[in-house]
Image: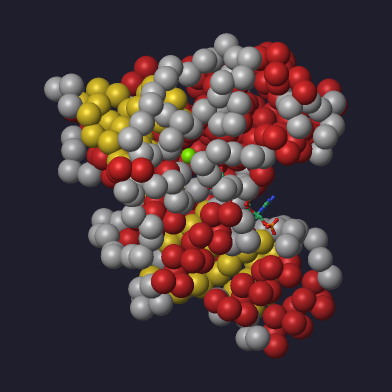
Amino acid sequence: MRKICLFGATGSIGKSCVDIVSQFPQQFGFATISAHSNIDALFELAQSQRPQTAVFSGDADFNAWERKFRTIGVEFLHGTGALEEAAARDDYDVLVNAIVGAAGLKSTLAAIKNSKTIALANKETLVAAGELVMGAAKENDAPIIPIDSEHSALWQCLVGENMEEVERLILTASGGPFREKPKSFFRDVTVEQALNHPNWDMGAKITIDSATLMNKGLEVIEAYWLFGLKLDQISVVIHPQSIIHSMVEFVDSSIKAQIGLPDMRVPIQYALTYPQRLPNNLPRLNFAEFNNLTFFEPDTVTFRCLQLAFDALAEGGTSPAVLNAANEEAVWAFLNKKIGFDQIPLLIEDALENHSNHRTVTLENVLSSDAWARKFVSEKQ
Ligand code: NDP
Ligand code: MG
């Protein structure tokens, strides 16, 4: 049985991972689960999944909860460093990191140093510190398998292929709920409108990122680090139906696509069973229901965030860390109704322009740039 350490168990990806693990009780079980604000949900999950350990990284009445977890025979870890402590243990085989934001970086690095397999949903880790993370993964022999649907699609298309024969990666994007709207529309967008994604049911932060197209920008950076190609070998196409999850074009002009219904349980399961596949009962695609798959060029003028991500990656150093942290702050500010939807790209651009880039990417530089960008954006609101 493969033992899983699942960080971010109470979120959208976390719940889908629990669903998959429950379908394969012979193959998978939980060593650890974690949450950050929802301790009741963590306890409920601990009751149903019976991991050895439950980690709570936020604030709570720890003594009372410690007693409660003891009654169900689950160890309770909490406080700063608890995620890293759990990631450094030897009681699991694969870390599924489904934490949202750069908050997932340190625990991913701890699992990498522990030479564990990483099934990565937490794309912000690669955006903020791709060079560090991939370097550490190589050094410690820790495979990083993507959960993000586009990257899982690329990963699947690349099985058995030679990277030197890849011409380009084509990331598909749904375009989000405002795909056909003019820029002038963005000033009055409400939180409720932005949270209403046409194809995917996801956590709040990534749903806003999908509406601004920053999600695709973060995914370009994620793909750059995962697959080790040049920036000009990564392109984006808008595909509103989200049936083709991404494509690889080869030097002989042949293109491979990975296709299926939009359901994150598919890439989660693949990341857990790779290089094998296991039969499941997930809904199947009926081609007759999708007789109109369409494709468009992304509009990087209207959706400025996508362009900012390409620019930050080209700039290199700590620019992607600033892009990511400024975006996180701006998105939470929008969700808390402190700023308008149209201010998100403006604040990120302002942070990128005012940041003094560290060319050498160390963990200290990434963390200080991240902290600087958060402060910069919060002071501008
Ligand atoms: P959610 O907001 O639904 O869940 C986030 C999880 O992380 C929760 O378990 C939350 O705990 C925990 N968490 C939040 N903040 C912190 C923190 N500071 N430290 C530690 N844990 C924290 O997000 P999603 O599941 O949607 O997304 C998770 C990651 O997966 C993101 O990086 C996202 O980009 C990526 N992803 C998501 C997809 C999706 O379909 N949802 C698709 C592809 C990628 P609590 O609930 O207790 O607050
Ligand atoms: Mg994605």
Judged left or right of residue 132, residue 293 is: left
Measured from the top left, where is residue 199 in percent x and y?
A: 51, 41
* Residue at point 33%, 49% (across, down): 285
- Looking at the rendering, in which quadrant would you find the C terminus? top right
Measured from the top left, where is residue 254 in percent x and y?
A: 17, 27
* Residue at point 39%, 54% (across, down): 266
Q: Is residue 58 above or below residue 180?
A: below
- For the residue pair 275 and 288, the one nearer the viewer reads as 288
Image quadrant where residue 2 sits? bottom left
Measured from the top left, where is residue 123 in percent x and y?
A: 52, 41
Q: Is residue 226 visible?
A: no
Judged left or right of residue 257, residue 300 is: right
Judged left or right of residue 379, residue 73 is: left
- Looking at the rendering, in which quadrant would you find the N terminus? bottom left
Measured from the top left, where is residue 363 in percent x and y?
A: 59, 38
Q: Is residue 17 above or below residue 155?
A: below
Q: Residue furthest top?
A: 301
Q: Is residue 16 visible?
A: yes
* Residue at point 32%, 48% (across, down): 286
